[in-house]
Image: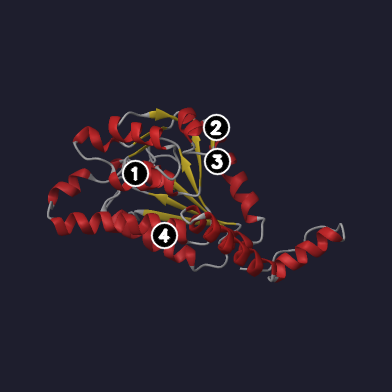
């Protein structure tokens, strides 16, 4: 993504749709796409619209400018340091992160620059993530005296505990290959291959039955934090509901008959 002129009238989050794939783009390049309250509200609004749009199969989260996201807007945070202001900001951020996990469509992070603090949280929260070789990641709040507590929630659900703790207490950057090894991202590509790689993954997901993907995504996060016996109970119920759908029955019939998969009808 190339930097664009940033004026007061520019939308903070833009949306484009192509073939069932909605791309939401953070559009605050001069501020390295820092998550101000206004950006968080705009992103939440767009995610809610996508959630209720049956034509959208996959969401790509991208960004304009040199950075993917530099975390919270520290200057804005210093303008009002009251408990209420801090609780409102971090509460809104948590609401956005939860919404990403709750919408039925898979969300792919397209990372072309740095992703720090809440920006790293954003990457960890997305269901999938593809980054360029030059991308760098950090939970760097500790460097200014602020432990990245809310980013920690997402980070520790992606990265092993010791690696996550190291990132949190040192604030050090890791490169894209290290992020891949840690489990923070899915793939590393060259800058000229980023769009192709993201669209390839998005297109592959969009070609699958949306109702089955929605069932699976919802269960995926619920079972992660459940006891194993409870997880199996939830999974059995989800499989039952999924199998009763028209798409699943048609797909199984086609497989048995050695015929091409049908056109998926479920929303």
Q: Which residue carries the number 4 mark? A: 99
Q: Nearer the viewer, mark 1 or mark 2?
A: 1
Q: Which residue carries the number 1 mark? A: 152
Q: Which residue carries the number 2 mark? A: 189
80 to 137, vertically: above or below = below
The answer to whether marks 1 and 2 mark residues whose Cβ atoms lie closer than 8 Å is no
Colouring scheme, one of rainbow, by chain, secondary structure, one colour: secondary structure
Left or right of 65: which side holds 23?
A: right
Q: Secondary structure at mark 3?
A: helix
Q: Is residue 202 visible?
A: yes
Real-space Cα separation, disc 2 to disc 4, in angstroms: 28 Å
Real-space Cα separation, disc 4 to disc 1, in angstroms: 17 Å
Q: Which residue carries the number 3 mark? A: 195
Residue 170: give x, y in percent of width and height: 29, 29
The quarter of the picture where residue 10 lies is: bottom left
The answer to whether marks 4 and 3 mark residues whose Cβ atoms lie closer than 8 Å is no
The tag earlier along the polypeptide, 4 or 1, is 4
């Amino acid at each position: 993504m190339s930097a664009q002129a940033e004026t007061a009238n520019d939308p903070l989050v833009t949306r484009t749709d192509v073939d069932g794939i909605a791309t939401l783009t953070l559009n605050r390049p001069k501020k390295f796409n820092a998550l101000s309250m206004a950006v968080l509200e705009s992103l939440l609004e767009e995610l809610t619209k996508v959630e209720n749009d049956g034509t959208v199969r996959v969401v790509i989260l991208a960004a304009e400018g040199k950075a993917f996201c530099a975390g919270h807007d520290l200057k804005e945070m210093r303008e009002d340091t009251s408990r209420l202001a801090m609780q409102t900001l971090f509460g809104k951020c948590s609401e956005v992160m939860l919404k990403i996990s709750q919408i039925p469509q898979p969300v792919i992070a397209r990372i072309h620059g740095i992703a720090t603090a809440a920006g790293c949280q954003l990457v960890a929260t997305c269901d999938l993530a593809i980054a360029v070789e030059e991308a760098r990641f950090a939970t760097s709040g500790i460097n200014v005296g602020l432990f990245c507590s809310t980013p920690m929630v997402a980070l520790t659900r992606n990265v092993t505990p010791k690696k996550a703790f190291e990132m949190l207490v040192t604030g050090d950057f890791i490169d894209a290959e290290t992020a891949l090894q840690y489990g923070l991202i899915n793939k590393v590509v060259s800058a000229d291959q980023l769009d192709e790689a993201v669209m390839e993954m998005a297109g592959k997901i969009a070609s699958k039955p949306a109702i089955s993907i929605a069932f699976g995504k919802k269960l995926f996060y619920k079972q992660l934090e459940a006891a194993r016996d409870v997880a199996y109970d939830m999974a059995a119920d989800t499989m039952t509901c999924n199998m009763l759908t028209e798409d699943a029955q048609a797909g199984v019939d086609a497989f048995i008959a050695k015929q091409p998969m049908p056109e998926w009808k479920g929303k």
